[in-house]
Image (tube, rainbow, N blue to C red):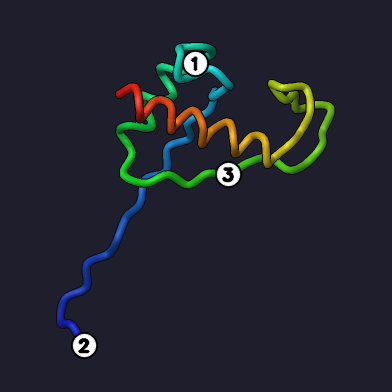
Amino acid sequence: NSSKSIPATMEFVDVAGLVAGASKGQGLGNKFLANIRECEAIIHVVRNYEDRRVVHVAGAVDPVTDAEVVNNELHQADIAH
């Protein structure tokens, strides 16, 4: 029963453009990884739907592989940093 209420705020930053090899500078890798380093927490959302109008960088939608690519690139960048 606190007498004071302090509202919490959260800022979401959409960081897109990660591809396999980002930790080695491919794609927007260096920019992506620099943006991620500024975050205090990461919420990872992957695509799991087909739509011909929305092109997938790998040519096919595979959310498991997409998540593995992001996790691997973050791990590789962390080791190199």
Q: Residue at x 53, y 28 (%)?
A: 16
Could you tell me residue 69's position as x and y percent? 58, 31
Say which element carries label 1: loop
Which residue appears farthest toward the left when viewing the image? 3
**Residue 78 marker:** none
Whichever of callouts 3 and 1 sits on the residue coming sooner in the sequence is 1
State the CA–CA distance, disc 3 to disc 2. Answer: 36 Å
Say which element carries label 2: loop
**Residues under numbered marks 3 and 2 in contact, where contact means CB atoms less than 8 Å apart:** no
Say which element carries label 3: loop
Number of residues whose C-alpha sits closer than 10 Å to that of mark 1, classed few (under 14), some (14–19) or many (20 or more): some
**Residue 45 marker:** 3
- Indicate the quadrant where residue 62 lies: top right
Could you tell me residue 66's position as x and y percent? 64, 34
Name the residue tied to disc 2: 1
Could you tell me residue 27's position as x and y percent? 54, 13
Could you tell me residue 49's position as x and y percent? 78, 41
Q: Residue at x 84, y 27 (%)?
A: 52
Q: Residue at x 52, y 12 (%)?
A: 26
State the CA–CA distance, disc 2 to disc 1. Answer: 48 Å
Q: Nearer the viewer, residue 20 or 14?
A: 20
Task: Name the mark nearer the viewer: 2 or 1.
Answer: 1
Please, what is the three-letter code of the amino acid marked with disc 1? Leu
Name the residue tied to disc 1: 28
Q: Residue at x 60, y 39 (%)?
A: 67
Q: Left or right? Give the position of 6 relative to 43.
A: left
**Residues under numbered marks 2 and 1 in contact, where contact means CB atoms less than 8 Å apart:** no
The image shows residue 25, relative to residue 7, as above or below, that is above
| Quadrant of the drawing holding the C terminus | top left
Task: Name the mark nearer the viewer: 3 or 2.
Answer: 3
| Quadrant of the drawing holding the N terminus | bottom left
